[in-house]
């Protein structure tokens, strides 16, 4: 068959397949300013080349531009980056990857990936794009791209783009109960060359014993603020469905001395993102001090992680203490050996 005839037939077949896929797909929300700018650049690069000699068009290159356009617009972006893929990219690019070395396992994030139920939402001057969500059974995270659409608001926050937040932030489970431990980290466009002016990368995190069961969680945000001043009034909701996940649960029943107090370690759970320990007071002062954790180590098969290699959280009261050790990389939990805490060696098997 003549090559030109073959190219024409291939182009026609690809166009028809793409058209059918787009007809079957749900309607996409309107593209953001960043998406429109990227599409314009893509089309310019693909079709306008005044310096180069004329040559025959390449149907495959034309199709690639159309596919990229689909990925950058609407729900296709969720499918392209979801399922744990975006978080795998973020962790692999982290400087902590060198510290954790072979103890980190980013491929398991693909098995932790949940479903983005709100791929895009725009109202009251803000646009949100949910990019990915993962859960390990006791901690979950959601990656969200936020864009400030109001130019006047951008001008007001230009001096301090990182000083923004929300007056109210809640994370609700499927039953409507509010998670007790959750947070949000924010990176402004001024610190990330991949972001357009007005864009923010948000990561929402939640710690909940019920995460092991999976289910739907909803992020509720109210009133966008800058330095405590309301910049955009409104309520925005983002929803995600998390996969069920098992965690390692142990009941050591070990006494550990932390500072001047003696605590009984009743239970611990271990998962790729964290180790959580629950204590009750046996004797001494129940006031917890961070210096009481000096010398704490997590022993893996081929390395040791110290306090500086993890993020610590604590809550105490009524004779109870809950400690959370969050890892900077998703760990291969099969490599966990033991925890050295307050002079006590606690097996993590």
Image (cartoon, grey):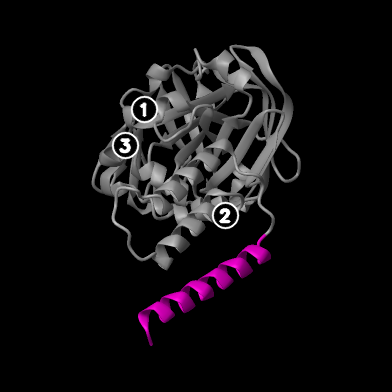
Residue at x 56% of width, y 51% of height? 78
Q: Earlier in the sequence, mark 2 or mark 1?
A: 2
From the image, which quarter does the N terminus lie in?
bottom left
Relative placement, left or right, of 96 versus 254 is left
Distance from disc 1 to disc 3, alpha carbons, whole Å, reads: 26 Å
Q: Earlier in the sequence, mark 3 or mark 2?
A: 2
The residue wearing badge 3 is 96
**Spot occupied by residue 319 in the image (x, y as percentages of width and height):** 58, 23
Q: Nearer the viewer, residue 112 or 131?
A: 131
**Spot occupied by residue 248 in the image (x, y as percentages of width and height):** 48, 50
The residue wearing badge 2 is 76
Q: Nearer the viewer, residue 246 or 321?
A: 246
Residue range corresponding to the magenta coloring? 1-25
Q: Main secondary structure of the magenta part?
A: helix
The kind of secondary structure element at disc 2 is helix
Question: Which image quadrant is residue 24 in?
Answer: bottom right
Residue 144 within the segment the image draws in magenta: no
Does the image show residue 31?
A: yes
The residue wearing badge 1 is 342
**Spot occupied by residue 4 in the image (x, y as percentages of width and height):** 39, 77
Dot 2: few (<14), some (14–19), or many (≥20) neighbours within 10 Å? Answer: some
């Amino acid at each position: 068959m003549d090559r030109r005839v073959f190219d024409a037939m291939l182009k026609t077949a690809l166009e028809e397949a793409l058209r059918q896929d787009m007809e079957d797909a749900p309607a996409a929300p309107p593209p953001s300013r960043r998406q429109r700018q990227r599409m314009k650049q893509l089309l310019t690069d693909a079709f306008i080349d005044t310096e180069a000699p004329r040559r025959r068009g390449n149907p495959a290159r034309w199709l690639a531009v159309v596919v990229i356009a689909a990925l950058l617009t609407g729900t296709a972006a969720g499918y392209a980056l979801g399922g744990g893929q975006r978080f795998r990219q973020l962790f692999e690019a982290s400087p902590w990857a060198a510290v954790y070395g072979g103890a980190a396992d980013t491929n398991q994030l693909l098995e932790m990936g949940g479903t983005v139920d709100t791929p895009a939402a725009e109202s009251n001057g803000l646009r949100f794009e949910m990019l990915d969500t993962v859960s390990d059974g006791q901690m979950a995270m959601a990656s969200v791209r936020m864009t400030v659409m109001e130019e006047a608001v951008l001008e007001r926050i230009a001096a301090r783009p990182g000083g923004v937040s929300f007056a109210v932030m809640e994370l609700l489970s499927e039953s409507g109960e509010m998670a007790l431990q959750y947070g949000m980290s924010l990176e402004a466009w001024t610190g990330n060359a991949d972001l357009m002016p007005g864009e923010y990368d948000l990561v929402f995190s939640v710690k909940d014993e019920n995460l092991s069961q999976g289910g739907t969680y909803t992020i509720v945000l109210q009133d966008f603020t800058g330095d405590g001043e309301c910049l955009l009034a409104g309520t925005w909701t983002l929803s995600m469905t998390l996969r069920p996940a098992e965690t390692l649960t142990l009941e050591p029943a070990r006494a550990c001395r932390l500072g001047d107090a003696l605590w009984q370690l009743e239970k611990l759970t271990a998962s790729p993102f964290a180790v959580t320990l629950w204590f009750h007071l046996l004797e001494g002062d129940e006031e917890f001090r961070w210096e009481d954790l000096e010398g704490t180590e997590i022993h893996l098969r081929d390395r040791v992680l110290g306090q500086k290699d993890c993020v610590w959280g604590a809550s105490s009261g009524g004779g109870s203490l809950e400690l959370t050790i969050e890892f900077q990389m998703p760990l291969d939990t099969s490599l966990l050996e033991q925890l050295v805490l307050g002079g006590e060696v606690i097996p993590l098997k």
